[in-house]
Amino acid sequence: MTKADIVDIITLSTGISKTETEAVVNGFLDTVIESLKEGKNIELRGFGSFKVVKRAQRVARNPKTNEEVIVPEQYVPVLKISKDFKKAVSDNMKVPQ
């Protein structure tokens, strides 16, 4: 599913114009990105929480040359899905379709 698909689904379910819906979706995504860039955590109850974690420096291997490469420490955004969300997906996938 793409962002355009999400915009289409929201447009159909809310009756808001496609242009307005796209602006809202883009605004939401921009807000998440900017907040994480500022080091803020985001919690959406029933969905999950976004935060930035520090990944330590590590040694990796180039699979083509088998040469060791040092991957420097970096900060990466992560999404931890809520228990309710996980359960809903798991329960739905177990149902024979």
Image: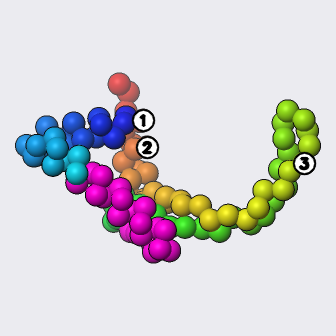
| x and y percentages locating residue 76 in the rendered image | 59, 61
Give the magenta part as a residue range: 24-43
Q: Residues within 10 Å of mark 1 (few under 14, many from 20)?
A: few
Quarter holding the C terminus is top left
Q: Do callouts 2 and 1 mark residues in contact (Cβ within 8 Å)?
A: yes
**In the rendered image, is residue 49 in sight?**
no
Residue at the disc numbered 1: 94
Circle nearer the viewer, 3 or 2: 3
Q: Main secondary structure of the magenta part?
A: helix
Residue type at numbered disc 1:
Lys
| x and y percentages locating residue 37 in the rendered image | 49, 68
Among the 4 quarters of the image, the one containing residue 66: top right
Q: Residue furthest top?
A: 97
Q: Residues within 10 Å of mark 2 (few under 14, many from 20)?
A: few
Residue type at numbered disc 2:
Ser
Residue at the disc numbered 2: 90
Residue 71 is left or right of residue 23, and the answer is right
Task: Identify whether 37 is placed above or below 14.
Answer: below
Does label 3 or label 2 sit earlier along the sequence?
A: 3
Query: Separation of disc 2 and disc 1 at Cα?
Result: 6 Å
Residue type at numbered disc 3:
Glu
| x and y percentages locating residue 96 in the rendered image | 38, 27
Does label 3 or label 1 sit earlier along the sequence?
A: 3
Residue at the disc numbered 3: 68
